[in-house]
Image (cartoon, rainbow, N blue to C red):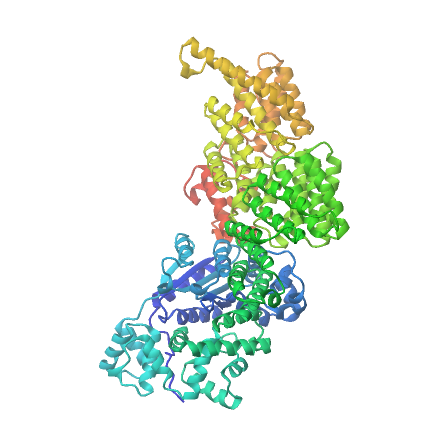
Amino acid sequence: MTREVVSPVLVGRRDDLDRLRALLDLAGGGEPAVALVAGEAGVGKTRLVNEISRAAAERGFRVLSGGCAELGGEGLPLAPLVDILRTVIRATPEHDLDSCFGPARREFARLLPELDPVAAKAPPQEFSAGQLREHVLALITRLAATRPMLLVVEDLHWADRSTRELVAFLVQTIRELGVLLLLTYRSDELHRRHPLRPLVAAWERVRSVDRMEVGRFTRDEVAAQLRAIRRSTPPAQFTDIVYERSQGNAFLVEEIVAAVDAGADPGDLPPSLRDVLLARTETVSEATQRILRAAAAAGPWVDDRLLEAAAGASEAELHPALREAVEHHLLVVDRTGRGFSFRHELTRDALYDDMLPGERVRLHAAYGEALAADPSLLGDDGGVAATLAHHWYAALDLPRALAASVQAGRQAVAGFTPAEALRHLERALQIWPRVADAAERTGMDWSQVGVLAAEAAWSTGELGRALSIMDEVRAVTVPAADPVGNARLVERRAVVLQTLGRNEEAAASLQEALALLPARPVTGTHAEVLASLAGSLVRIGDERRAAEVARTAVHTAAAVGATAQQADALITLGSAASYLDDPPAGLAALREGLALAERHERYGVALRGYINLSDALEMLGRHAEAVAAATAGIELAVRVGHGRSHGAMLVGNLAEPLIRLGRWREALDLITEALADEPSGVFASTLLLLRGELHLWQGDLDAAERDVRAARHQLGAGTDVQFTAPMVFIEAALAHARGDLADAGRLIRAELDRPDTGFGVRYAWPLLWLGMRVEADLAAAGADPAAGADPAAGADLGAAARAASAELHRLAATTPAGTAPALAYRAMFGAEEARTVVAWEAAVSATRAATEAYPLCYCLYRLAEARAGTAPDATLKATVTEGIALADDLAAATGDEIRVVARRARLRLEPTAAGPGRSPQPEPDPRCRLTDREREVIALVAEGNSNGEIATALYISPKTASVHVSNILAKLGVSTRTEAATVAHRIGILS
């Protein structure tokens, strides 16, 4: 029996432990925290993690940990997540698994089949890596709801891309409950091009992330380590030798002690770490050395049965050798209990690198043969194909490596790791020309593998690579030989083009795909191409053609049983018809497609249905119905793991009708909490534009400008009118508010200078109204002050204004106004030009009929302005009173403008009515525009609660609470929480 070489007590690391304990305190109090623990190989990161894990468990934390693992130079897909899931499964009674894993149990089973063996073998449903990430977050949230959690992910330097993306997502989103996310990596592995390096750099700039570098031991700490290992004080000369040779690396200290204990001369130790490690392995028997070399070729861990088969050892030979390796601290039982692993990866690396090439090839071939004969030798791990692909490729057996790579690629797609699927499939494409019977071995032709690789590239966001692979496939494909397959390839390519925003090109490609297809027999590909073409036609504004194609797609899909395409085409048909001239039929088709998609669990299609249905209802002015549809869609999005993508879009679709109905505070709370989850792209742009519109109408021009700039940044090069038109509206309104009428008019004319389509009409009318307001203000102002007293300049300006007004009239005359909101804006357009009492009365009636809160408020203001000095005081007072009441309810800046009208007309206004037993309230302070949620937060702030306590009380995240507090401070014009509470008391918010 050899002596223990690991110190029984933790040496040093007091400062590191104190920092980690402080982070545990935060997590225990409900605040999230992230710790980045860096250090060179062998310096003691894992020992530090073990110590803080033990401390966390003693404090009642749930401790979950997983480690990244390397196989053949690549990280095993989602290895730490699989470790964590396995731990959760084994700690959860069978009858509680459904409630623990929620709706994602079936999807998680693809990573760990023991969770649901039946679901693991079922054909994969539509599911994305993004959904998986949201389901992981939901699982963590459920588990952390009962007690705080320490979540450990070790060895991130080996992480595969899917794991890196998952960890990055968790760093960004773990906010709901007390969770300490502890991440370790080797700092000496992060070369300039290492994919983890930019993530670490970004995390270091995040306030909630604490990065610590675990350093080498000092001489005194090495002495303490030696004293703990040997249970006596070592001679000073021996300590000096060990410190000099180890340079304070804790693992190397242990290996030197083990080597000396095995008989090595302390004064004649090998010159390098690699040599020290190899010398340690040479202290065991030859039979054990042979088993160690075989284990080194296996990967991060190996089952003893698999090791027995690959090493060609009998059970009688294997077990004594394993026992000797464990006693000499070279192997340990794997932390998941699946088999054996090296005590430190450095030892495995040294042994593997020391083997001759032929020895490696033979060992990898032996592992391949053993696993091919009995895949269960890999235990409950689902990555048999990936492991086989690695071993056959390393064994230079390209035919079998090809088949395994294709299979591994397909499994990676089903297992939500498209980046790893792309790696396997690209290797298969590379090997293909060197395998004569490639098609027979894989059951696919080269083009089919290429399409799979392209789809994997598309799923990872590598759109350029996806197009490149598809173009390679098309270049070697003869359309006449397989017209259906070629058409499907073109359809897939069009989807990538749509993602890139190249909608015209996508539509042309789909027309080409349709032309490639034979009329008979009708196939599922016909339905796919037709459904995609209908959607593309909507995107380019050809709603009439889109409706025709969608009808054909619906019938075709129904005939061939293509449920997803049938539902998708019904939704497209409904959207197109709603924007054309048949809203009832359009809404019916939308609801039919949505019901079909939900019935068959086509949730991606169903969410598109909810988005389009709520949008169509809002376009028609049916605001309350739009609220109901968007709310139902949000519930589905959260349930199926689309909360931060489709869910964020639906939050926008919910906030918009709330804004139109005048429920601004509710909408602003909704937007604030959705943006706290940091959505990106069009999902963020939607929310930012709605908030910018509210800021604009509430008079906070700087905030509105910040939001529209952020929205433009999130949209990037996108040109979709549903984003660009609201952007221009806000930018032009800001220019108008700041007196730059010429710039406001220029912005509006540029946005309106595009073909009007059914989809774009709803966005055109607000711009037409604002444009006429700008031109009317220019006309009312006479000459531009910049023109001075020069009559010629004034004449030129007048001519330009008349030309602009004529163009707006032409556009208004040709733009349909078949919905209540469009009729309201058309009335406002006419009122801006006429600026008479009669015209503004008509506008008030139209906006009231459309239940458009802000337009009604604005029209009441303009009507009061027109009536001042001409109408009886009672009539004017009624208009002013209604306008002020609505503006104050909205917290709109228009209330101040109406009060100015009242003062000029010398109207005496009554104070706001008070409730029973209360005094009349004074005119509200303009700073007191707090939402309902912000009023709840300021009340808790006044009671002295922290952000974490506020979050717990209101069932929101600490970050969201922090956002609300920051908004409150800005609105009240103060810089501290104490000042905010004082002001809130003084102006009556807390009364």
| Quarter of image, res 120 | bottom right
User: Which residue sits at x=36%, y=85%?
Assistant: 282
Count of marks placed on residues: 0
Image quadrant for the C terminus?
top right
Height in image: 514 above or below 765?
A: below
Q: Would residue 609 be seen by someone viewing this image from the given angle?
A: no
Return the x and y of residue 677 as percentages of the image width and height.
Answer: 52, 49
Height in image: 139 above or below 250?
A: above
Q: Would residue 500 be seen by someone viewing this image from the given angle?
A: yes
Return the x and y of residue 278 as percentages of the image width and height.
Answer: 35, 80
Q: Name the outermost residue toward the bottom.
A: 316
Return the x and y of residue 850 as percentages of the image width and height.
Answer: 67, 29
Report whether 265 appears left or right of 17. left
Image quadrant for the N terminus?
bottom left
| Quarter of image, res 530 | top right
Return the x and y of residue 60 as percentages of the image width and height.
Answer: 51, 68
User: Which residue sits at x=47%, y=51%?
Assistant: 946
Towards the viewer: 377 or 724: 377
Q: Name the outermost residue toward the left.
A: 237
| Quarter of image, res 580 | top right
Towards the viewer: 776 or 302: 302
Report whether 820 appears left or right of 768. right
Towards the viewer: 546 or 914: 546
Height in image: 203 above or below 434?
A: above
User: Which residue sits at x=45%, y=41%?
Assistant: 969
